[in-house]
Image (cartoon, rainbow, N blue to C red):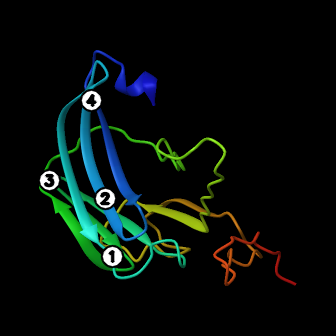
Amino acid sequence: MDACTGSAQTTTEIDIAECVGTSSLKNNLILWQNGSVINAWVMYTSLNGNASDSFHIYELDWYPTLLVFKMDGQITNTIAQSVQVPMFLLFDDEARTLPTGLPTALTVDWVRVCSDPNAACNPGDSTMIFDDEFNVGVVPISTSNQGEKKQGQKAQ
């Protein structure tokens, strides 16, 4: 990321889902240049419950002049802005504010990318660009009564 944000050229970052604590979601569109933010659209959404209690579906519908962010099918934020640059996917479990000894975990079940934001984006969709199921046969991480995370188990 430093190579992207430290460039003399303007670079763009879209954060589809950045959890702030456990009950707030942040959606961003940020323009960087020379390591500094030159323009940013930062929007927060209060969540009902804890974002880490179960799996959620985070979506970005990217139109020519509009970004529509969704969580579990519900619109969380919109940004009316044209973004006409190539992008790449990055999954990051960055925890800058946590003590270095504290373990963190990020579990991604599947990712789908379609060229048509109005498509269902299901397997076999003709607009599918990328489709990967990372944890086929793995039971999601569960939480014990003590709040201790347990490792996911392979399904039998």
Q: Tell me the element at label 2.
A: strand
* Residue where numbered disc 4 is placed: 32
Amino acid type for the residue under numbered disc 4? Trp
> Circle 2 sits on which residue?
26
User: Badge 2 local density, few (<14 within 10 Å), some, or many (20+)?
Assistant: some
Q: CA distance from mark 4 to mark 1?
A: 28 Å
Question: From mark 1 to mark 3, how far is it between C-alphas?
Answer: 26 Å
Image location of residue 144, percent across then percent down = 69, 81
Q: Which residue is mark 1?
A: 47
Label 3 CA crowd tier, 10 Å (few <14, some 14–19, many 20+): few
Quadrant location of the C terminus in the rendered image = bottom right
Quadrant of the rendered image containing residue 123: bottom right
Disc 2 from disc 1: Cα separation: 10 Å
- Earlier in the chain: of badge 1 and badge 3, it is 1
Q: Which residue is mark 3?
A: 65
| Point 25% across, 47% down: residue | 29
Q: Amino acid at mark 1?
A: Leu
- Mark 3 / mark 4, whichever is N-terminal: 4
